Amino acid sequence: MAPHLTHAPESRPELAHLYARPNRLMTALEVSRELGRSERTVRRWWHSGELPALALPCGRFTMRACELARWILARERVARGRNA
């Protein structure tokens, strides 16, 4: 797991809003908008474990804003490693 970050890395200031309220729970719609993917894709990634999620007692999934930011940064590191 990536280290706990309390602010957006200088290299990605556009993630700062995710760290403004790091424990905010995000819906599939909010996550999909951040990632530029469909809600269906986000839900599929949550169910498959590709994208970390919290299961709510009602059966829905959600994730914390800081976890989304960490996931985005981790995917970018992996992509850079493949392109190196």
Image (spheres, rainbow, N blue to C red):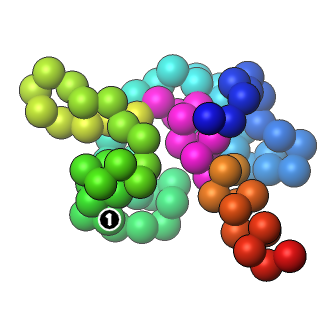
The residue carrying mark 1 is: 41
Residues rendered magenta in the picture? 64-72
Q: Give residue 22's position: percent from left, percent from top.
A: 58, 24
Q: Is residue 72 visible?
A: yes
On screen, residue 12 versus residue 62, left or right, reads right
Q: Give residue 82's position: percent from left, percent from top.
A: 74, 74
Would you identify the image quadrant in which residue 60 lies?
top left
Q: Residue at x 72, y 29 (%)?
A: 3
Give the mark count.
1
Magenta region includes residue 69: yes
Compared with residue 44, is residue 6 higher up or lower down, i.e. above or below?
above
Q: Foreground: 24 or 55? A: 55
Q: Residue at x 14, y 21 (%)?
A: 57
Q: Residues within 10 Å of mark 1 (few under 14, many from 20)?
A: few
Q: Residue at x 12, y 33 (%)?
A: 59
The quadrant in which the C terminus is found is bottom right
